[in-house]
Image (cartoon, grey):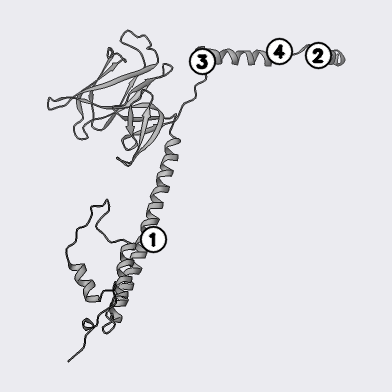
């Protein structure tokens, strides 16, 4: 009669390999945890060492099976290390994106439907995306102030397919320059099929702050009037254009011509010492 490991009675607290396998197959009540169902490194090591400790001494684990489990352990270790490296890379990329976003503060971005900021009476330009195949039978631009009052209406007529740039000089229908502030630009487009639609215009807005949104995995730009725009929606980014306040407030070319005339006058006039020297040289020559 053959003797098996099951015939031997083990000391208290120690179970045989067969008992361990039966215990693993038996249904158990598992507490609900906020973890995934995959086996982690800690669980794998616990199972592996427990299996070695409780293996049948008369029928130990075969070399092939042992090597296979060691290979699984090595693969698990490599996967864990790769996951940690990827998490570190993602964190570094997020920091770089925030640094990039910080450099955008103070600049102007163009985004669809964004507010138009009038500054110093400088013209405002926006981009309108028309039908890429047919264009538009007519395009009309309406400008509204912060109270929603219509202050300017501009007709552009028929436009070809593709992007179309609209511009507002900052004046109302009476030709009066409007004060600085936020304005709304709305384009009414009539298609060749008779359809009437209102399309958003990509207008420049100054960035005041930048935040990162894990929900959208994108940078959120806050502009001057408090509106927010996703960086992925931005069509264009513009830097500040330096305007000489003296030239701008005094008429521009007029002040430049005045300075030029003064320079020519100063160049043509001679000092008193230079005049006396010329007279002395003339007397010697005579």
| Pointer 2 residue | 273
Report the number of numbered marks. 4
Q: Marks 1/2: CA distance?
A: 86 Å
Q: Marks 4/3: CA distance?
A: 24 Å
Q: Earlier in the sequence, mark 3 or mark 2?
A: 3
Q: Is residue 269 left or right of residue 222?
A: right
Give whichever of 41, 209 is nearer the camera.
Answer: 41
Q: Marks 1/3: CA distance?
A: 67 Å
- Evaluate if marks 4 and 3 touch, with contact meaning CB atoms under 8 Å apart: no
Q: Is residue 145 left or right of residue 88?
A: left
| Pointer 3 residue | 253
- Residue extending farthest left: 193
Is 121 above or below relative to 48? above
| Residue drawn at (38%, 17%) of the image | 181
| Pointer 4 residue | 269
Residue 251, image x, y percentages: 50, 12
| Pointer 1 residue | 81
């Amino acid at each position: 009669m053959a003797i098996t490991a099951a015939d031997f009675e083990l000391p208290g607290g120690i179970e045989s390999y067969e008992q361990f396998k039966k215990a693993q197959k038996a249904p158990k009540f598992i507490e609900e945890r906020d973890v995934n169902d995959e086996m982690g490194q800690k669980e794998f090591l616990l199972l592996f060492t427990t299996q070695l400790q409780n293996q049948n001494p008369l029928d130990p684990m075969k070399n092939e099976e042992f090597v296979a489990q060691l290979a699984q352990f090595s693969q698990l270790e490599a996967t864990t290390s790769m996951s940690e490296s990827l998490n570190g890379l993602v964190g570094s990329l997020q920091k770089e994106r925030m640094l990039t976003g910080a450099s955008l503060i103070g600049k102007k971005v163009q985004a669809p439907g964004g507010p138009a900021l009038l500054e110093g009476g400088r013209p405002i330009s926006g981009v309108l995306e028309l039908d890429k195949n047919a264009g538009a039978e007519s395009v009309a631009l309406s400008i509204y102030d912060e109270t929603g009052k219509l202050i300017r209406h501009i007709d552009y007529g028929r436009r070809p397919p593709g992007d179309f740039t609209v511009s507002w000089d900052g004046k109302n229908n009476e030709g009066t320059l409007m004060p600085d502030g936020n304005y709304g630009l709305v384009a009414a487009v009539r298609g060749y099929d008779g359809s009437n639609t209102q399309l958003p215009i990509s207008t420049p807005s100054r960035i005041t702050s930048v935040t990162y949104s894990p929900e959208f995995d994108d940078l959120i730009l806050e502009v001057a009037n408090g509106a927010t725009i996703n960086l992925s929606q931005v069509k264009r980014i513009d830097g500040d254009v330096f305007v000489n306040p003296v030239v701008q407030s005094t008429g521009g070319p007029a002040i430049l011509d005045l300075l030029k005339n003064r320079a020519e006058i100063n160049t043509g006039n001679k000092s008193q010492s230079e005049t006396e020297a010329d007279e002395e040289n003339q007397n010697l020559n005579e």
